[in-house]
Image (cartoon, rainbow, N blue to C red):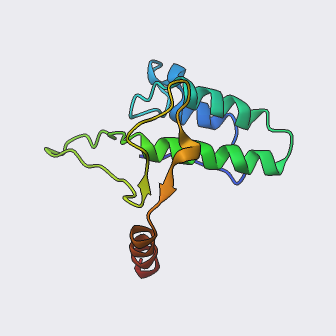
């Protein structure tokens, strides 16, 4: 599986994670993600006014994707594999009209374990 990225994320993000790409043959949205919040963040990322906004929207997109627990088909495997970071937590009660990302937090102990693991790689 190849998901070519650049140092300046832009239009290609819609092919990887956008709702329209989930139903179009030949795109890279292998997980079939259809999320209007992700679509909106991609739109804002593509039209970012400066590098600071681009970085901010890329971080938001990253958090949304990590929170989604998406399954990626592994074709030919009899198992289902999932990848996730277990250092992020979110409140049990979420805002009605928001994804509530601004209320998430990072568990310091779990974040330390993730950092240690990444440094071993």
Quadrant where the image shows the C terminus: bottom left
Residue, x 60% and y 37% (percent of image)? 13
User: x, y (%) of residue 37?
Assistant: 56, 28
Left or right, 58 with reference to 68: right
Left or right, 61 with reference to 56: left
Left or right, 78 with reference to 39: left
**Quadrant in the rendering for residue 41:** top right
User: x, y (%) of residue 108?
Assistant: 46, 70
Residue, x 54% and y 46% (percent of image)? 103
User: x, y (%) of residue 17?
Assistant: 52, 34
Residue, x 55% and y 24% (percent of image)? 97
Left or right, 96 with reference to 43: left
Does 19 appear above or below 93?
A: above
Instruction: Return the residue found at the far left.
Output: 78
| Nearer the observer, 51 or 76 | 51
Residue, x 63% and y 36% (percent of image)? 12
| Nearer the observer, 51 or 110 | 110
């Amino acid at each position: 599986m190849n998901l070519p990225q650049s140092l300046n994320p832009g239009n290609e993000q819609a092919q990887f994670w956008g709702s329209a790409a989930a139903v179009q043959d030949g795109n890279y949205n292998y997980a079939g993600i259809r999320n209007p919040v992700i679509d909106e963040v991609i739109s804002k990322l593509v039209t970012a006014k400066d590098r600071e906004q681009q970085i901010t929207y890329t971080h938001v997109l990253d958090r949304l994707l990590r929170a989604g627990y998406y399954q990626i088909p592994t074709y030919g495997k009899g198992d289902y594999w999932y990848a996730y970071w277990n250092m992020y937590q979110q409140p049990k009660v979420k805002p009605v009209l928001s994804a509530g990302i601004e209320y998430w937090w990072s568990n310091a102990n779990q974040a330390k374990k993730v950092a240690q693991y990444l440094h071993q790689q």
